Image: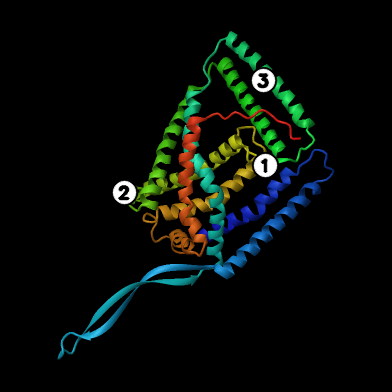
Amino acid sequence: AWQIVLYCIAGFVLILVPFAMMYYEAQDPDQKSILEQIKPALIYTIVAFFIFVILLIILWLTIGTANIDYYKYIGNPVNAAPSAVTYGFASDSSSDTLEVKVSFFVYLCALMSVVGWIVFFLFAGVGLVAFPMDFIRNFRDRPKPINGAEYAMKKVEIAKETQVLIEAGKKLDEKSNKNSRKHRKAVAGFKRQVNQLERYYEKLEISYRQKGGQLLMAILQLILGCLGVVLSVAWILHIILYNAAKVTPFLNNMFIAMDNAFQLFGVLAYGAFAFYLLWCVVKGCTKVGVNLLLFTVYPMEVNKTLMNAFVFNTGLILITSVTVVEFCANSFDQYAANTSVNALFTVYATKLKYLGYVLKYFQYPLLAISFLSLLWLLICPQRKVEEDEDDD
């Protein structure tokens, strides 16, 4: 079952998602034929696929071995006594390392997990902090009822800000060097300001026309924020106490105790912790892209999500899902002992030459990113975009 699932993920990540992403990015209202979208998307997908496959095959053939530690026992027959007919055994043991050539499937899973870790440690690290904090802040800053005078005054402010943004947009459109990194960063900052103004206007409309909106939704956000705090703290403590220090099994014991109470409780809790990491990845991606303006952000909003946003976030979740499976298998190895996924990642993948170091030690940068994110969001929760400068 795991082979089918992981091969399907590889097919989506390497073929379907890149093709769909390039297909929708190449969409142009003035295009004459759909082939103008298909051709560049197909070329990009084929080139990227063959580069990955060639790299995978070369690495698998050259360093696709796992060094597995084991104990060997040596027994020597000895007489129980000089005149005795029976024999006893004097045994001795020593540790050794067995070098095993892994299968192509195992190496594919390990390489996908390594690629996923490159984005996972950053986005999940930020998301572990940003997820609960954003929900709690949304409750704190929820729309509150306002009167007509306040509504009119704030609409005047929005109109002024809109005019400023229109002028800024015209200046950006008139720039000559539109392919420079500085210009792309300025455009990303402009889009963020427009998005913030739209959200502010929507919040204003809810405050006046709906008298603050539904209180139940705000309470639900508070509950999700508090639950996120519990899950984030539990994950961070587990990484420190078990993954790093091996002081206590921590969450492993909790899952086992829940299974002893009822068989499905432990499985549900395991799944909740795993899916929470994926949710943190999406939140972290949005948070990093919006605040640092490093890349194009594809937010998911009800009735406002474009198809390329769906495709991008699908690819992000798929590539990091392999990393989440590997990370959970190693973090909860006592609870998931003697399972196929435990053997795949704990026995073989983490013991691979070179790749194993990434799977073992990238969790420590994840912790560091989480602590830095906590400081960043506490000190400057709303980062202001710098005023536009000329690119010339």
Residue at x 76% of width, y 28% of height? 171
In front: mark 1 or mark 2? 1
| Quarter of the figure that contains the C terminus | top right
Q: Is residue 157 left or right of residue 91?
A: right
Q: Is residue 273 left or right of residue 294?
A: left
Label 1 CA crowd tier, 10 Å (few <14, some 14–19, many 20+) = some
Q: Which residue in the rendered view is the most extreme toward the top?
A: 149
- The numbered mark, 1 or 2, whose residue comes first in the sequence reads 2
Residue 277 percent coordinates (x, y):
48, 44
- Position of 159 relative to 258 (above/below): above
Q: Secondary structure at mark 2?
A: helix
- Residue 257's disc number: 2
How packed is label 3: few (under 14 Cα within 10 Å), some, or many (20 or more)? some
- Image height of 225 relative to 247, above or below: above
Give the percent coordinates (x, y) of residue 285: 57, 41
Provide the residue designation for mark 1: 308
In three-dimensional space, the C-alpha distance between marks 3 and 1, rounded to whole angstroms, equals 29 Å
Colouring of the image:
rainbow
SS under mark 1: helix
Answer above or below: position of 366 versus 81.
above
